[in-house]
Structures are given as C-alpha cells and as structure tokens.
Image (cartoon, rainbow, N blue to C red):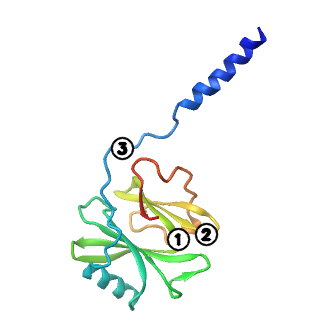
Amino acid sequence: MKTQFLLIPILSVFIGACSSNLPVKSSTAMQEIEVSPKNNPALIRAINTYTNAQTDFDVALFDLNQDGLKDAVVLLKGSNWCGSGGCTMIVLKAISNDQFQPHSKLTVTDRPIYALSSQTQGWHDLSVYTRGTGQVLLKFNGISYPSNPSLAPAYVDLLNQNGNKALLP
C-alpha cells in the first residue's frame, strides 16, 4: 500500500519532466548572418566616419528590422572603445546595399551578442553580455536600443533556443 502512495508522486515527476514549458516561437526561419563583411567598402566607410578613425572591430550583418537589408552590429575594439565594463557596440541601419547610417550606440557590451527571435516594434530583440550583470535583454524602444545594457533586465531564456541567432558568439 505504501508503495502505491510513493509510486504516484514519483511517476508524476518523471512524466512532468518530459513536458516542455518553453514558449512557442514563430516558425519563420531567420536569415543567415554574414559574420565577415570587412571587405564591404560602404560598411568600412560608415564605421570610420562614426569613429573618426580606422578602428579595429568585429561585425555581423543581419536584417534586424525585416526591411530586406542587412543591418550591421559592430563591436568596436581597442582602448578608445573598451573599458573595464566592456566595449562600445553600434548598430548601423542599412539604407541600401551600399549605405549605412548610425542607429544605436551601446556601451559596456561584450560577446556573445545574439539576435533573438522575439521582436519589439518591428526590430529583433538583442541579447548582449555585460560584465557584472551577465546576459541581458535589449528591446528597441521606437528610436534605438538601450544605450546602457548594464541597466537592462537579465535575459533568462536559453540563448540557443530555436530562432535565436548568434551574431558575435
């Protein structure tokens, strides 16, 4: 008799562990990421204009706002752009295939940087690492992404879930 009372809770734990409570994401496939576009003259020109110098950087091209053009997520490197909290990241919005304009500037940012499958106001949400906080969630506010990721809420979901794309792992 005692065995039956113990068996029911144990089985329910095993059965419950098999179910998934993850939110359902859209099945729309996200496009491929171009992670090595340093031979793009328009992109180089936009970054050099923004930084007023030839600065070292890492970049990924990804259509953040579904306009058919790949925007640039740029992580600037070097002592002018990095400090103890991380580095400066800029988002350059693609105006055409050969023209970019500054869109957002974020400080204290580090890798990994992800484009999430979720969107806010037509732009993919981003997740970046910021020292002291960890991985955070950045939502477009209608004008730009938040400028200080260390003040953003922690990102608690799994980064490698279906639909999220590692821009700069």
Amino acid type at circle 3 is Ser
Residue drawn at (25%, 65%) of the image: 69
How far across and down, in percent of the image, does residue 154 sit? Answer: 58, 58
**Judging from the image, what secondary structure is the residue with disc 2 in?**
loop
The number of numbered discs placed on residues in the rendered structure image is: 3
**Residue linked to disc 3:** 26
Amino acid type at circle 2 is Arg
**Residue linked to disc 2:** 131
* Disc number for residue 110: 1
Quarter of the rendering containing residue 93: bottom left
Query: Mark 1 touching mark 2, by CB under 8 A?
Result: yes
How far across and down, in percent of the image, does residue 32 sit? Answer: 31, 59
In the rendered view, would you say 104 is above or below 138? below
Counting other residues with Cα less than 10 Å from the Cα at mark 3, is it few (<14), some (14-19), or many (20 or more)? few
147 or 58, nearer to the observer: 58
139 or 48, nearer to the observer: 48
**Judging from the image, what secondary structure is the residue with disc 3 in?**
loop
Q: What's the CA distance linking mark 3 and mark 2?
A: 31 Å
How far across and down, in percent of the image, does residue 47 sit? Answer: 35, 82
Q: Which badge, 3 or 2, comes first in the chain's sequence?
A: 3
Amino acid type at circle 1 is Asp
Q: What's the CA distance linking mark 1 and mark 2?
A: 8 Å
